Image: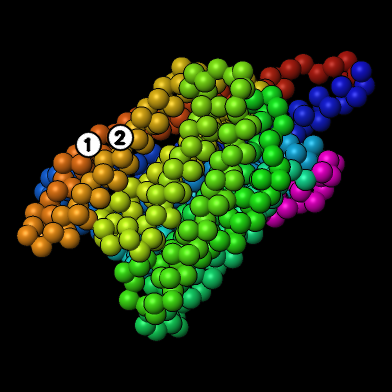
Amino acid sequence: MNQTANKSDCSGELEASLRVPLLALFGGAVIWLVVGLVLGLIAAIKFHAPEFLSACPLLTYGRVAPAANDAVLYGFCLPAGLGVMLWIFARLSQRPLALPVVPVVAAHLWHLGVLVGLGGILAGESTGHLWLEFPRAAAVLIFAAFLLVALSAAATFGWRRERNLYPSHWFLFAALLWFPWIYSTANLLLVSHTLPRGVVQPVIGWWFANNLIFVWLALMGIGTAFYFLPKIAGRSLASSGYALFGFLTLIFFGTWCGIPQSAPVPAWLPAASALGALLSVIPLLALALVAKKTVSGANVACLGGPFCFIKFGVLSFVLSGVLYVSQFCPRYSLILDFTWFGFGVTQWQLLGFAGMILMGAIYEILPKVMGQPLPFPKLARWNFFFFAGGVLLFVIPLLIGGVEQGMQWHDARVPFADASAVALKFLRVSTTGQLLVLLGSLCLLLNVFVMTIQWKLGLVKSVLAYLTSPLAASEVKP
């Protein structure tokens, strides 16, 4: 009986220590997600109507498109992923979050860095390197914020009461180490005063983009999925050996990819990239097998709840991963290079994989942390259907349009302008999918915003009640 009470008290203290840090991380992340999707919608409309917002130099396609992508990745995926990591580490450690003030400071630094970065891109101060478009000041803020969150997560991990390690620990702790390594390296080499010459610059850029989008997102997303899938399904994670095998092969083979076959570099680099892409199919299949065995036969109704989000995210991880590595196959890259195919795969990884898993985790975490149910549970279900349907309607036309566009380009009888225009009809359908994704994100924003307001109002009422309550007889001085 006493053990049960102590465990309940520990759980309450644990959730209370996470409340403010997670509200700071999740609240800003959801806002940046909506901002990024709005900017992406503006960029897509410019292909159908080039005169749209043409009088505003801040909203030209060359500025809006990278700002949209960076807002989704750096504004939503990274801070939301860090918040989920903190919660999982605290739960697996069975102790409150260590240094809880540090993530709150880090969250404000992070959101300030994203604001400075997006402002710099829209003002024309982009660095010009893919996924490194933020100016140096914004990059410094983001890097410092990540280190602060990592400090709190590492301290929680080090002071854990439960000493056993779980597969989620492997993936999430590797993600904490992976990002500062690749981000600092890429910024020091590409955004410093002394830049490398010649083809070394694009090679570094491809290496960074691959490690960020393919490897880091996989470590964060799969680590999160391997915690929530067995928890919600009410069973242990199946085949931990396969999970370890998938983890090791992912970080070993996945880092080789990224260099396209058409790159003007020594031939051995694209060849090594193609080999790494082929071998990366092994961890994809291993991790898919673990997830399939874990959820197979689970008696959990999938009606738009967190379980549905995370299952859809894992499925998207496998499918988008296979499509991603196919781009580096010499036979297919001849058709797929310089088309909308690569953009569609990237959006599937960002929104369909990372976005869906993080949304499911947020819906599962927030009611526990806040100690109250979601204010609009029906909106959470609508969020799933809008977002899942929107992602499919967004990326599938881009994939089909990219293949058709590449085939037209390789037909010498088709003029280049006509081959480029082939994708326009697919882009129109894709824009509809973007709108649905935006509607789903607004559902999440409303739930998070109302929960935050309710908590703040409750906090104010508690303070007022304490200040206006009469003093106890023992507290009155004679």
> Three-letter amino acid code at disc 2?
Leu
Q: Mark 1–mark 2 contact, CB under 8 Å?
A: yes
Marks 1 and 2 sit apart, C-alpha to C-alpha, by 7 Å
Q: Residues within 10 Å of mark 1 (few under 14, many from 20)?
A: some
Residue 368 seen in this snapshot: no
The answer to whether residue 280 is above or below residue 232 is below
> Three-letter amino acid code at disc 1?
Val
Question: In front: 150, or 407?
Answer: 407
Q: Quadrant of residue 231?
A: top right
Q: Quadrant of residue 223?
A: top right
At 81% across and 18% down in the image, what residue appears?
Answer: 471
Who comes first in sequence, dot 1 or dot 2? 2
360 sits left or right of 293 in the view: left
Q: Residue 333 location, x and y as percent?
A: 32, 60
Q: Residue 252 location, x and y as percent?
A: 60, 62
Residue located beneath label 1 in the image? 429
Mark 1 element type = helix
In the rendered image, residue 123 lying in the magenta stretch gets the answer no
Question: In front: 29, or 227?
Answer: 227
Q: Quadrant of residue 237?
A: top right
The answer to whether residue 210 is above or below residue 189 is above
414 sits left or right of 389 in the view: left
136 sits left or right of 364 in the view: left
Residue range highlighted in magenta: 142-164
Residue located beneath label 2 in the image? 393
